[in-house]
Amino acid sequence: MPEVDTRRRNLVVAAVLLAMLLAALDQTIVSTALPTMVADLGGGAHLSWVVTSYLLAETIMTVLIGKFGDLYGRKKTFVISVVLFLVGSFFAGWSESMGMLIAFRAVQGLGAGGLMVTSTAIIADVVPLRERGKFQGLAGAVFGVATVAGPLLGGLFVDHLSWRWAFYVNIPLGVAVVLVALAALPTIRTDARPRIDYAGIALIALAATGLTLVTSWGGTEYAWTSPTILGMAAGSVVLLVAFVLVEQRAAEPMLPMRLFRGRVFTVSGILSFVVGFAMLGGITYLPIYLQYVRGESATASGLWMLPLIAGLMVTALVTGSTISRTGRYRIFPLIGSVGLSLGLFLLSNLDATTSYWVMGLFMAVLGAGIGLVMQVPVIVVQSTTSYGDLGVATSGISFLRTIGSSFGVAAFGTIYANQLPRNLVVPPGVDPRAIASPAAVHALPEAVRAPIVDGYAETVQTMFLIAAPIGLVALAVAFFLPEVPLRDTSRAAAAGNSGVGESFAAPPSNSYDELRKLVSAVVARSEDDPGPAVLRRSGVDLPLEQAWLLGRVYRASADDGVATPDEIAEMTNVPGGIFEPTLRSLVRSGHLAFNDDGYRFTEQGAEVFTRLVQAWRGWLLDQLHDWQEPDQREFAQALDTFTGELIESGRRLSHV
């Protein structure tokens, strides 16, 4: 792996965080702009697909991109993902029809899925393990900000520019990301040549799209009993069966069927699906109520959704902290499911006269319910899955949650499209096209406006009333979730998890990435600097600063066997002269040799360094005692890599 100095590393991290922010924002930024998009482009029956196409494409790319990065290099796949995202953004903003908008939202989703996964891998390449916990906090904050800011920014663009700027705003920021990536990203290509489960990916993509179309078109475009809907439903079921058969025989299945033999994974997967269904389903359609019924501007509708997001974020943070402290989690999905169902039922009582405080309280209840339950499935699965399946199991839970979100948006959209024509009474003499936008509706005289507003209110009430039993389904599922002892790594991840970030982010692409994330959380949470304990364990009779500097000499001399103070200074961002006295001490003690080229290890120095490496590995195994699986060679190899990264950690710089 090439050396990345501190300045370059910070530049890479900034670019990656910006890319993740763009991808996360576009999951929610369209929600408050949807009513205006429909008024401008028409095609209100297809409104749900503006969100669904993005989610489905993102999910498919999430599965593919990690392996493409291993094959062709992460720098190349990252830049291609940004370009895809920019192309989708530009043409989505330029759309002249709902069909064009939906198509280029899918292109955006492909780019976003690539950005999510590749960004995580790039950070693992350039950020030392000890500092990776800080990045996880930053990434969680990015997703939290995006969840809050998305609806608000969408509203601001609609009110003060145009809904098209919800997409155009990505262009200059994305170009900046590409330029930084080309200049600063190291070219890292692994030797691995993974086998990609193309058949499984194609089958699940077609099946999910078919079922989403059935949900979206049934009762709107076609009757539920029409040959088109019945044929599409039957075809989707056949594709699902074919997917199961293919996954049982694939060399590297995207979702191994053996995972479903475990009760924990099966229950957690169903729970994730249900929570995803409710989460984006509610967030996407609340602006319809706020703008058409309450007459709020797009900006104000984004602001009025903040109680929902606040409830979600607070309970997610409290849940993670409590799970980390107690190791118990089963109560949270039980309470959260009740809150989810209660929140949806309360929202079904919203009308034009509901006070703002009551409306905000109802939204906060829904958000709190979602926040209590949504991160538990991932934490539990990470505690019960073997190391070999850790990455794919985590990805599987996230995949099921995203598919649930797609179905939720589509199902809510179908209810909306079915109920609105029945409830909407357009007074005689009023052109139906003149009430397509919220502003046009509320510009009408009171007598004309009232029945139209009531029609929208009844439609939204029906949507949430039908959706309320979803929480009861989640409650029934949660009763089957067993309480198992949590691994220390999972408890650490629970404490550091932002909740919102974990909910919207794509998962790491493999077991190594997932375990590396969990280990970094454990290391970051250690109360004491592990350096002294490791030094005692090694039995090396050296001051801590000399032992630390041996690690830096090893790192600086990796290419040509020689390390200079300037090379060490570049990697530590500390003047090289500071290291000279310690380097001379190591020469006098026989651990290093010096000539005109620089410092080299002696045999004695190499032996001491090996003992330090072994001591670090032992310390890490002690921290990960619940992950020891000696029969899994990959696990031991991953620990060896972690040990090397820990030796290079910069935390002990303060002891120099």
Image (tube, rainbow, N blue to C red):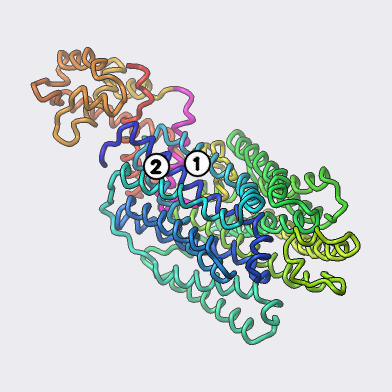
Tag 2 and tag 1, C-beta contact below 8 Å: yes
Residue type, mark 1 in image: Ala
Q: Relative to 500, is 191 on the left or the right?
A: left
Residue drawn 38% across and 22% down? 533
Q: Is residue 140 visible?
A: yes
Q: Tell me the quadrant of the picture where the N terminus can be found.
A: top left
Q: Quadrant of residue 315?
A: top right
Question: Residue 123, relative to residue 155: is it above or below?
Answer: above
Gap in angstroms between the C-alphas marked 2 and 1: 11 Å
Which is nearer the eye, 356 or 555? 356
Question: Which contiguous range is marked in magenta?
Answer: 506-528
Residue 430 shown left or right of residue 389 in the figure: right
Residue situated in front as seen by the camera: 3 or 376: 3
What residue would you read off at disc 1? 139
Q: Is residue 227 magenta?
A: no
User: First in sequence: mark 2 or mark 1?
Assistant: 2
Quarter of the figure with the C terminus: top left
Q: Mark 2 belongs to which amino acid?
A: Ile
Position in image of residue 155 (x %, y %)? 66, 50
